[in-house]
């Protein structure tokens, strides 16, 4: 949907859809769905012997995961609103087509769904008589850290001057998210080596993408917008991304070697190809930092993350087999 074709007279649903197309496009849902499925499968792999199951209920888990990242996006819209009015007055929210209250209502609805689903999973799949079972407790940890992020840990002015530490503190939430998704996949699942590694993978890949999208060519830099290229230089920031991509690939290899049995070689070949593609893009950016190069880097890192989760999924299924169930 073209935001320019939307006016204040357009239905509210149309205006919210325009905001989502601009700030939270549904195509990004694929990564969130794969993240949930990977966490759920790893949870079941760690908890049971034999074939790993996928169920129709996992479709709900995918949508609930997407709804959480929607909430994170809305938190960011509130936190950065004043700065975005200055730097991006043409956006749907900043131009007044929708308001922060509209987004707040959307976030409250998503939070209600997350709480309801977590409580249902605890009540149906566990014997825990407590109102707060493992899935709900994991959600509370995720949401608690997300609220701290929204308040910038009550030291926003100090933290914003330290962009790398800022990103690090925010990416820690990925550990909590993975643990919640693991519990959604199988309540009371153990904290296995594979689960811990998946948390590190989500952290490293998220960190890599965050730095990539804020490493800009000279023509993109603005005085009022922070970037890692201002801190480290475009080449230095790209080298940092390369180190994170290497860490991401190494973590993906570790998980595959853990879960893949004897059939891990094809997965490692895929990761080697992903690494070469990422390095090609990033090294080209180092040679000539441009906006187009930054966009290619974003695509390469996102593709590397997505394929990394996919090869983990396929490795588990090849090693253990897969069963399809209703619940």
Image (tube, rainbow, N blue to C red):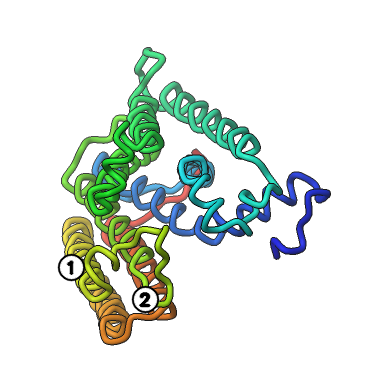
What residue sits right under mark 1 in the picture?
243
Residue in the picture at 43% in, 48% down: 54
Q: Does residue 322 appear anywhere in the picture?
A: yes
Disc on the earlier residue, 2 or 1: 2
* Quarter-of-image position of residue 133: top left
Helix, strand or loop status at disc 1 = helix
Could you tell me if residue 263 is visible in this image? no
Find residue 191 and report its horizontal and vertical position in percent.
20, 37
Q: Nearer the viewer, mark 2 or mark 1?
A: 2
Residue visible at 50% across and 59% down? Answer: 28
- How busy is the neighbourhood of tag 2: few (under 14 within 10 Å), some, or many (20 plus)? many
Left-right relation of 96 to 203: right
Residue 217, disc: 2
Q: Quadrant of residue 271?
A: bottom left
Q: Secondary structure at mark 2?
A: loop
For this rendering, which residue is in front, 71 or 49? 71
At horizontal 71% and vertical 49% (from top left) the residue drawn is 97
Residue 49, horizontal then vertical, whole percent: 25, 44
Whether residue 98 sits left or right of residue 74 in the image: it is: right
In the rendered image, the residue lying farthest to the right is 9
Residue 299 locus on image (x, y percent): 41, 72
Q: Is residue 232 left or right of residue 185?
A: left
Q: Is residue 41 above or below residue 21?
A: above
Locate residue 178, reporting x and y percent: 32, 43
Q: Residues within 10 Å of mark 1 (few under 14, many from 20)?
A: few
* Number of marks present in the image shown: 2
> 210 and 173: which one is in front?
210
């Amino acid at each position: 949907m073209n935001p320019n074709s939307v006016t204040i007279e357009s239905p509210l649903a149309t205006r919210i859809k325009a905001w989502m197309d601009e700030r939270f496009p549904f195509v990004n849902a694929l990564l969130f769905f794969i993240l949930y499925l990977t966490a759920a499968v790893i949870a079941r792999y760690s908890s049971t012997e034999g074939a790993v199951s996928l169920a129709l209920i996992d479709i709900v888990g995918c949508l609930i995961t997407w709804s959480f990242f929607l909430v994170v996006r809305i938190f960011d819209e509130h936190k950065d609103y004043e700065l975005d009015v200055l730097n991006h007055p043409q956006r749907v929210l900043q131009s007044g087509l929708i308001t922060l209250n509209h987004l707040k209502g959307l976030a409250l609805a998503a939070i209600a769904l997350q709480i309801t689903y977590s409580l249902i999973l605890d009540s149906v799949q566990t014997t825990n008589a407590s109102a707060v079972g493992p899935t709900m407790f994991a959600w509370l940890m995720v949401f608690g850290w997300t609220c701290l992020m929204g308040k910038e840990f009550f030291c926003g002015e100090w933290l914003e001057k330290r962009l790398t530490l800022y990103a690090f503190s925010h990416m820690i939430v990925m550990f909590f998210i993975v643990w919640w998704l693991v519990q959604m996949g199988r309540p009371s699942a153990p904290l296995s080596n594979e689960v811990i590694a998946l948390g590190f993978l989500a952290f490293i890949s998220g960190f890599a993408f965050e730095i990539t999208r804020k490493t800009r060519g000279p023509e993109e830099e603005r005085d009022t917008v922070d970037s890692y290229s201002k801190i480290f230089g475009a080449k230095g920031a790209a080298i940092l991304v390369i180190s994170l991509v290497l860490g991401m690939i190494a973590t993906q290899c570790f998980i595959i070697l853990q879960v893949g049995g004897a059939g891990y070689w094809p997965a490692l070949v895929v990761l080697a190809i992903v690494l070469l593609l990422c390095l090609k893009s990033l090294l080209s950016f180092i040679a000539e930092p441009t906006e187009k190069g930054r966009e290619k880097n974003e695509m390469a890192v996102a593709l590397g993350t997505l394929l990394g989760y996919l090869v983990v999924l396929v490795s588990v299924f090849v090693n253990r087999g897969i069963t399809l169930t209703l619940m």
